[in-house]
Amino acid sequence: MEIESIKPFLAVTVSLLGAALILVTRRSPNIREGCSLAAATLKFLIVLTMIPTVLAGKTLNYTLFSITSGVSFAFRVDALGLTFATAASFLWILITIYSIGYVRSLKEQAQTRYYLSFAITLSATMGVAFAANLMTLYLFYELIGFSVYALVVHKETEEAFTKGNRYIFYVFMLAKLFLLAGILAYALSGSLGFNPKGIFPSKADPILITLTYLLFLVGISKAAIIPFHAWLPAAMVAPMPVCALLAGVDVGAFCILRATYYLFGLDTLKELNLGLPLVVLASFTIVVASVLALTRDDLKARLAYSTIGQASYTLLGAALLAPAGLTGGILQIVNHAIAKVTLFFCAGSIYVASGKTRVSELNGIGKRMPFTMAAFALGALSLIGFPPFAGFISKWYLVFGSVEAGLYPAIAVLVASSILSASYLLPIVYAAFFRDLPPGENAERREAPTMMVVALIITAIGTLVLFFAPSVFLELARVVMGEVG
């Protein structure tokens, strides 16, 4: 059942209002940051009010304007989009809190531009989550690219602009393949609207449908599938809260999930065996990115390559074309987000408190920063998939999805990835707590500013909460399965 509601439009625009207030109050940092936090909180509350409606099997719709009968700028809230929006809006509150401590401690330049770009990025992210059709999705997808670029080059150094150019090349050049895929989809179906049963008529040319699907996989570069991943390590030149946003709020994986099931539909995917290319790409990315993470001494780079691999769990779940697999992929959006944001928060706190950026420098750091490194340990265990942490649940469903689909090699990929994740994360925890500090360093406790530590503790606790109380997201995943199955 579909109902008309302005709520999705409000969820998108409230951060634009926040952006305007940030600009107006730029000469008063306390008020400026208060506006950012208030907009984040209000957005999250709006998103929460839509959960009961969606769990009741309804969708919320709002059309801003129509171009033709088949093309409009419109919003639609369903279970898949709401899962993504809930995670993103909640994390924005914590990233905002963390940012206040981070940018003030480091006396970052252009702080108003920083908060302004953040607000626009989150507005566009909500637009992606609640897009009712491919045109709306694409426009917000591109807007994220523009706003994130300002955050990537925030430091305005030669390195920042060099890596920002690499980010622009991958994200914007490949996005033109995304656009081409959308044009082909419209030509084959006469529609751009998302439909849980797919949009392509039975008489559509299967070769062109397959080509369209492959263009989506490559064109949605924010999914960071190897070999189209180089933008993400480059973007890590940005301030740490931005890295947390890029790593935790996985727009690319969500867009591929949306396109896979709401443009092509389960029947078309099975008939043309379109899950197979995504299984291969996702599995390759999971293993190779994990190996690359293992070789990186720079903590940001290690977490960046970890993100590339972990994000592909969502894609693998979608590609299995099985109920448990899709459930695991949906849960991975949330579970990976909370764990990875925790790890990036910890990395930023280590840098602010000690100036250290390399894994090899972290011996004994847990004696000086016990809260930060305890949170890092919880995030790492969740990412690896240990119970009782959230990451275990999504991987559990992915394993069952692999069995349902009869793709047993996928289980081997999941096991190998968990072993590799443990290999590049657990040594950090061990070194932090069980090795001595370097000569000349004392064990005097020195954590990062309180606002940063509070934010990372909340996300670390979240990795436990989502294991013991995952019911809301499980119910949303079941609603998705009821739509697409």
Image: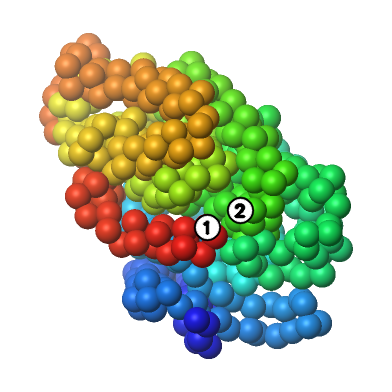
In percent of width and height, residue 168 lies at: 71, 46
Above or below, 209 against 36 in this view is above
Q: Amino acid at mark 2?
A: Leu
Tell me whether the residue at label 2 lies in contact with that at label 1, contact meaning CB atoms closer than 8 angstroms.
Answer: yes
Residue 66 left/right relative to 318: right
Above or below, 383 against 198 in this view is above
Q: SS class of the residue under badge 1? A: loop
Give the colouring mode of the picture.
Answer: rainbow
Label drawn at residue 138: none
Front-most of 298 and 4? 4
Above or below, 291 against 162 in this view is above
Label drawn at residue 266: 2
Badge 1: few (under 14), some or many (20 or more) residues near its Cα, within 10 Å? some
Residue 287 left/right relative to 434: right
Q: SS class of the residue under badge 2? A: helix
Residue at image position (84%, 59%) is 203
Residue at image position (50%, 45%) is 322
Residue at image position (73%, 47%) is 213
Mark 2 / mark 1, whichever is N-terminal: 2
In percent of width and height, residue 465 lies at: 21, 51
In percent of width and height, residue 461 lies at: 21, 48
Q: In this view of the protein, can residue 391 be seen by the observer?
A: no
Residue highlighted by disc 1:
485
Q: Amino acid at mark 1?
A: Gly
